[in-house]
Amino acid sequence: MTPDALSAVKPSSLSIIHPLLQRMTSNHWAVSRRAIEADEIGNGHAVYDLQAEGYAFSLIVHASWDGEEKPGRRMDKTADFLLSIVNGLADDALIARELAGLSVPYYGGRTDSKSFGWSAANRSQRSFQAVVDTLAAGRMPDIDDLQQNGGYVLRNAGFYGNGRAGAANWLSIPAASHPFSDPYHMDLFLLYMWREIGLDFVEAIATKRAGTVRRLDPRLRRYLGVGNSSGLGMTCALVRWPQWVGTWCLMREIALAYALSEPVHEEHVDKLAERLAQAARFYAEIPGPAHGLTPHPILTADLAKVAEQLDAWRAGDRGRRNWRQFYEAVRAEVGRDAVEQLVAFLIDLHPELVARLLTLMPTQMRRTRAVVPEMTIGALRRLIARDYRWALDIDMSSQESTWHFWYHSEESGEQRRGERYVDPHSEYETFVDVVRPVQACFSRMEGLTDSENVGHFLLANPDLAYIVSRIQFLEFEPYGEIRGNLIARSFLPLKVIRFLLSVFGLESGIPKSAAWVQGVLLQGAPTPEEIRQGRLRDWRMPLRSSWNTAS
Amino acid sequence: MKHMGTIPVSYTELARQGVLALRGLGYSFSIAERAAHTLATTEAVTGLGLKCLQASAQRIEATAATSLTAATAATGVTVVNAGGKSLLELSPFLLDVASGDAERFGRSAVLVDDVDGMPFLADIALRAATHGLAIWVTYSSRTEPQSLAARPASFTVRDRRISGRPLADPATVWQRTGERLEASPLASIIPSLSAPVREGTGRVLIVGGKAGADLGMLETEGDAAAADWQLADTWQRAFDRAIQGHIDAEMTGFDFFYKCVKRAWAPTSDRSRGQQG
């Protein structure tokens, strides 16, 4: 898919947060807070325990506040909140050890395989303090103010797991039956927990200040989400893990094909009409992108058109109606974002199919890439001609087409994007550009006999091993590659960043620059108590006007 | 967290950060992302990966951008002159050749001369085991103290099991049938095996076949003089332990590793800071 196509994709039941919450609810995951201590400023710690599907975990939280807003960089001196998720219920010694490690400046602490990793979060400069102040004064925060300031009190600053700082390898988690065996489930569970932890600390600090117990209205707690800010590193991640991109998009295509081939049921039409109306209101209520993506006024107008088309279509000859006909009619009339919203809603009409597809996803996502050395040069040549024609056809001869390069920044500890003809150190370029290596590979195979094998070719051309293994790996993954020139001067990273956030389940991302997308996740999501009781509401696209109606 | 000069390190940390570390020493991304797994695997199963990286760093930097020479004879034996390159860089590629030829032709043989970094052969053993390839390897080296190559040795991978033993003389190898190697299709390389190893480097012979193939077994000249050499037997178990837990790496090697990592970090210019995400 192209960056433009990916940028329009909308969250659906396939988005990872939804199967995670489904799993948490179905299996009655039980989160309990063992301890929380906070002073009037916000320094303190907390311990949470999780019992899930026969496994136990503890979350050890370190909180500090130095009065400075943190951008959320890897090389920040610290984060306002840091946690370690450990295997089993932590005893006092492990809690003390992890708190000591978390408090080392510049993420300089170490852990070991008892911890699955560390996660960080920072206060919303606009909301956290205001909510504490209001609550300490004995009043409830104003929901409109909160929404205008992002709809959250904590902003996620990343999960550093899978071996980082000595933490456990992700491969150590059993591929089946473990609560966190599915890709990204642990990452998103911790996002879910940051939402709870942030609100718990708001209450603890307000209580300390007031000298009496202060609690947020449970409805307010449910309405607020967790902030997220995603940048350039997401582009590298999407290129690095093509099997995730390919698998998710393939499942989406299968689900859409199924939905379009199903007979038309009136209850589905009713549901779709209801969702379209809710979506139009939702996008009208929340801030939208100012540049680079479809502005919300255009999207809401398009969704209104889709709703009108649906009304007209359902009033037509029932015997001749089918979903594909409707879908094609919509595609002809409205922009890409509204079409993708329709696609997401059509997929959501078939939860049984989605559930079956989701069972296939982890195995596909866990596939590992390796060179297939016995493949012949002839076969590799045919594979490139079949799957990478788009890359062979891109003209990479101009400076404009090779303008950018990604690199690991010593300043931020994260991926940054430099300008190749201005900035130094392009020799340490992070692998983001697929086009030039594909072209180089195709070119260097010229003159070789078809019968020669890849093993010998790579011994002579070791710098091509990665791209060859990638081409081989994606032989049956038609959606694995982002089909565009990601190092061109004109490329906007926000397009692919927005896509990854949709895969996670973020309903509206707002680009703050060409390479930086903010948003809020889990707004309206079920509380830990609802999950423990096995109650999963339809919580998506929560409307401000209805925040206090759900029980 | 630190005990007796060691530090708990995860396999994945070495494999991920190793890409940067090895790029810091001059390897291209494509080579570094494979060699990082070789490094992590070797550290996991022998505890020698980081130490060998540090000991070989200058040679790695000197040879990272050089080319090797390779030729495949009519007998199917591929002869490689590594020009002093390290097995850290070459192991995956050598196994590719052995594996690719074995898959297509039933049998393969790769002789590598003038090669450095014998401890990284452990990666070949592990990769062969996980790829379902039957191989045997013999190697010799003269000047690698504290490494697997302190004496000539061999190991075999058959049916996902690895076993190893020292060789009195790598030029004199026998097959299980009792037939001397000289009588096999590999006879043409015997003179090469017998030639002196260049000072400071080593020689490796990899013979491979499809999983389950009977490649014969290497036998030591005379009796099993040092049949107690069982290090290779422990490799797979050590690897599994590293995945399930962690690796206790020596601090000096670990510190050096992160020095190499930081070489590949680049400063952020004002221009790129302006478009940061």
Image (tube, coloured by chain):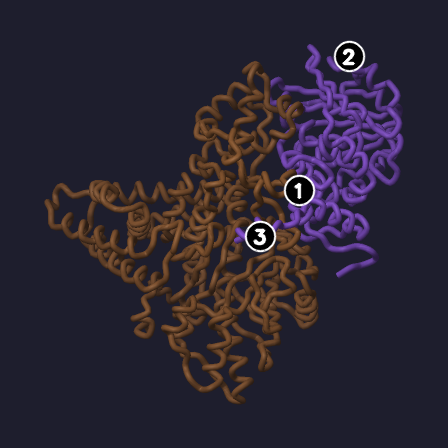
Image mark 1: chain: B
| Total labels drawn | 3
Q: Residue B109, how many percent across, how many down?
A: 71, 20
Question: Mark 3 near mark 1, Cβ–Cβ under 8 Å?
Answer: no
Respond whether the residues carrying marks 3 and 1 are from the same subunit: yes
Image mark 2: chain: B
Between A133 and A170, the residue placed more toward the observer is A133
Q: Quadrant of the N terminus of chain B?
A: bottom right
Respond whether the residues carrying marks 2 and 3 are from the same subunit: yes
Q: Nearer the viewer, mark 2 or mark 1?
A: 1
Residue A179 at least partly seen? no
Dot 1: within a 10 Å radius of its alpha carbon, few (fewer than 14), some, or many (20 or more) residues?
Answer: many
The chain coloured brown in the image: A
Answer above or below: position of A200 versus A449.
below
Of labels 3 and 1, earlier in sequence is 1
Q: Residue at x 57, y 51 (%)?
A: A174
Which residue corresponds to mark 1? Answer: B19
Which colour represents chain B?
A: purple
Between B97 and A126, the residue placed more toward the observer is A126
Of labels 2 and 1, earlier in sequence is 1
Mark 2, secondary structure of its residue: helix
- Three-letter code, disc 3: Arg
- Three-letter code, disc 2: Ser
- Three-letter code, disc 1: Val
Which residue corresponds to mark 2? Answer: B188
Position of A517 with respect to A282 (left or right) is right
Q: CA distance from mark 3 to mark 1?
A: 24 Å
